[in-house]
Amino acid sequence: MAVRIQIRRDIAANWVTANPVLFQGEIGYELDTRKMKIGDGATDWNSLAYNFTDSTGIDLLQVIEGNGAYYFKSTASDLGAGRYEMTKDIPAGGGFGISNSGVADGDILAEFASVDGFPNVTYLPSGPLTFYMNAVQTGGTKLTKLYAEFYTRTIAGVNTLIATSDFTDGLTGVATLFSSFVNMPVTRNIGLTDRLLIVIKANVTGAGTDPDITINIQGATSSRCRFPFESVTSVNGFFGDVT
């Protein structure tokens, strides 16, 4: 039988009203603020300090809300320069192809940026990031693989490379969801106004003709990046169990 672990949870106002005393080590989670407190067996809720927050109360666990992933969307980013948005929400609708012809080694196939003000990325934990991209090689004979570069971008427009993934398997003439990995060696704190950028590039090798590549995003393509931490959410969606 599978074991399901659920954290005690409710909205902040209900926690304040109930004001329970959590057992020592027991976690209480605010659904609307995404903050946590850990009990000591003696102190009531309203007197407990929040855990996993910095000195200003910013939740350090707000890496990627909900499902731990950024999905690549066909919506143009406000940063311009041909970039697209990436958000935690699974994009609705059909797929969207981004085509590149005569691709050379190291060429940028697409760039994706987090949305301004969301999720106020302040913290990226160490661990494996997994990059997924649906792609097809529609022309050319050279061997082509994909990889991703991860950047932080300041409000002044300065990009800083923080990680590079390994290569996917070689692309084929059939649209396939490819994956690659990168290990974030250390935890990174990021400025409140910074963005996260993911740049998709081509690794082209061998003899032959330059490839034509289409990467597919949006909808059911499942093109995304999954991060090493998934923030806590209700397992079954039932709320209101503070009391």
Image (tube, rainbow, N blue to C red):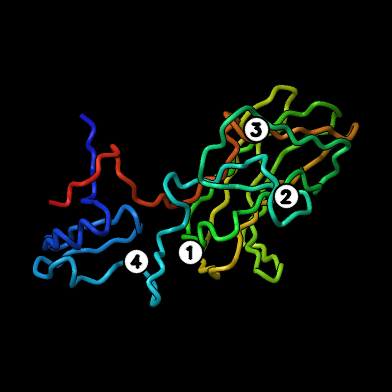
Mark 3 belongs to which amino acid? Asn
Q: Residue furthest left?
A: 42
Marks 4/2: CA distance?
33 Å
**95 up-or-down from 242: above or below:** above
Q: Secondary structure at mark 4?
A: loop
Looking at the image, which residue is at 90% across and 32% down? 209
Mark 2 belongs to which amino acid? Arg
Q: Secondary structure at mark 2?
A: loop
Pair 3/2: label in front: 2
Q: Position of residue 86 (x, y in %)?
A: 60, 47
Q: Position of residue 48 (x, y in %)?
A: 20, 70
**Which badge, 4 or 2, is on the more N-terminal residue?**
4
In the rendered structure, the answer to whether residue 179 lies left or right of residue 44 reads: right
**Which badge, 1 or 2, is on the more N-terminal residue?**
2
Which mark is on residue 134?
Answer: 3
Which mark is on residue 123?
Answer: 1
Which mark is on residue 83?
Answer: 2
Q: Position of residue 95 (x, y in %)?
A: 65, 29
